[in-house]
Image (cartoon, rainbow, N blue to C red):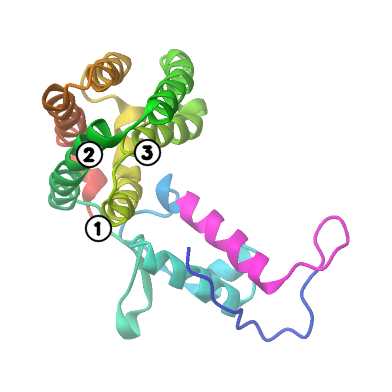
Amino acid sequence: MLERPSSDSSAAPPDDASGNATSPKTLVSAAYQRLRRDIIEGRLAPGAKLRVEHLKDEYGVGAGTLREALALLVSDALVVARGQRGFHVKPISIEDFHDITRTRILLECEALRQSIEFGDDVWEGRVVAAFHRLDRIEQRLASSPPDDFDEWEDRNREYHQALISGCRSPWIRHFLGILYQQAERYRRLVITRKPIPRDLHGEHRAILDATLAHDSGVACKLLAEHISMTYEAVKQLPETLFSE
């Protein structure tokens, strides 16, 4: 996350609940995290105008702090700045997710191929451990998806990161991190609404087995199908979810 000095004009930062002064940097970070969560979870709808004069009171920060938080979200491509029209939540669309999906498949399959070629025992152990943590949450996800989504998202990200952690290209891993984050809003829609029947655990297990067998051809094929399945699920969602 980019860091910028706060531009709030207050003479002294407010105190937190413990009575300690809260630094401007901490205020920006907290506002950024709250705004990001509200965008990801849809409380701030795709395409919605983000009016600083209204949001600063809702989020309990100054206008300068809020603008800095919004600027960080612009760098995350979750918010767009439209000149004199101010800030808006970035819209979502089938076309956008198709581009994300296609690019992610190209990069993540290459990263997995490199990991299988160059990964050592430590890498394999990392993959197995990440799968185990993901497996535990996926067993609970079926019964309470809204409550467990955030934990599932963390475990799913850790698993995919572990799979490609043997890749020797830092740039590929960097761009995959961006793509994964961009897909989060779409994944939440799919996981919480379940537009098509799907065995996520089975998909993850099959990728793991092929990876540990060092069969890069099968592993990459399964990974591509796994990523594509989310796109196919998104296509079944109501069009109203994608209107600006």
Residue occupying image coordinates x 59% and y 70%: 56
- Secondary structure of the magenta portion, mostly? helix
| Image quadrant assignment for residue 224 | top left
Q: Please, what is the three-letter code of the amino acid marked with disc 1?
A: Glu
Q: Is residue 57 left or right of residue 177?
A: right
State how far apart marks 2 and 1 are (Cα): 40 Å
State how far apart marks 1 and 3 are (Cα): 32 Å
Q: Please, what is the three-letter code of the amino acid marked with disc 2?
A: Gln
**Residue 12 horizontal/vertical position (percent):** 79, 80
**Residue 22 horizontal/vertical position (percent):** 76, 67
Residue occupying image coordinates x 59% and y 63%: 29
Secondary structure of residue under mark 1: loop
State how far apart marks 3 and 2 are (Cα): 13 Å
The residue that mark 3 highlights is 161
Q: Which residues are magenta?
A: 15-38
Q: Is residue 114 visible?
A: yes
Pick whichever, 138 or 56, lies toward us.
138
Q: Is residue 102 left or right of residue 204?
A: left
Residue occupying image coordinates x 20% and y 27%: 226
| Dot 3 or dot 2, earlier in sequence | 2
Residue occupying image coordinates x 36% and y 30%: 120
- Does the segment drawn in magenta span residue 60? no
The residue that mark 2 highlights is 114
Q: Is residue 134 above or below residue 181?
A: above
